[in-house]
Amino acid sequence: MRFYGIALAMSAFVLGACGGGDNAATTDTTTAAAPGAEAPAGGAAAAGTGTAAAVTGTVHEVRMIGDAQGFRFEPANFTVKQGDGVKFIMVSGAPHNVAFENVPDAAKAQLDANIPAADKMSELQTRYFQTEGEEVTISFANVPAGAYNYTCIPHAAMNMKGVITVE
């Protein structure tokens, strides 16, 4: 009987952790970049502040996958230019999210502001994506050059990680 109580408690915990917020809303990539229209042109935001900045360059696609080969981002490691965007697309093996780790203080506010509010779960972290085809585009406009480590929190232990290098 004690086993069933523990199993029930653990099930409730796991289901609560996988909830991830309102999944009824879909992401419209055309509106994801719209808030950046008010962002000042050129130059990075002051340290500690950030205003959403629209994608002004190429949009790179990253697929979030979980299958018989494992959990992964495809591609996981790549280089973008300032102003480019990265579109993360949920393919299989849900739930997935994108969480940036060890971001330098000078870049935190801008990168966080560039994650669309409708898709944000917390600072530097998207909500969980549950359904095939869900996506989020994150702008790297006004984000300082450097390497930005990211992971999928539910699958971090399975090495679902990557690095985006901004030139």
Image (cartoon, grey):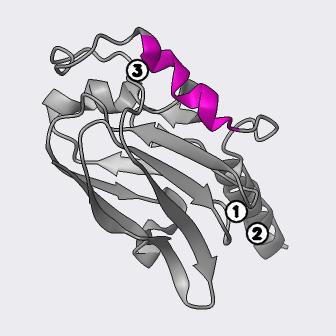
Q: Quadrant of residue 79?
A: bottom left
Residue found at x 29% / y 26%: 110
Question: Considering the numbered disc 2 on the image, is that residue within a helix, a strand or a loop?
Answer: helix
The dot on residue 74 is none
Residue found at x 24% / y 39%: 82
Between 140 and 120, the one lying in front of the other is 140
- Which secondary structure dominates the residues rendered in magenta? helix
Is disc 1 surrounded by few (<14), some (14 to 19) or many (20+) residues within 10 Å?
few
* Number of disc labels: 3
The dot on residue 10 is 1
Which is in the foreground here, disc 2 or disc 3?
A: 3
Q: Determine if the magenta segment contains residue 13.
A: no
Q: Are marks 2 and 3 in contact (CB under 8 Å)?
A: no
Residue 118 shows in the view? no
- Gap between marks 1 and 2, in whole Å? 5 Å
Q: Which residues are magenta?
A: 27-37
Q: Is residue 160 above or below residue 53?
A: below
Q: Are marks 1 and 2 in contact (CB under 8 Å)?
A: yes
| Direction bottom: furthest residue | 68
Q: In the rendered image, which residue does mark 2 sit on?
A: 7
Q: Quadrant of residue 4?
A: bottom right
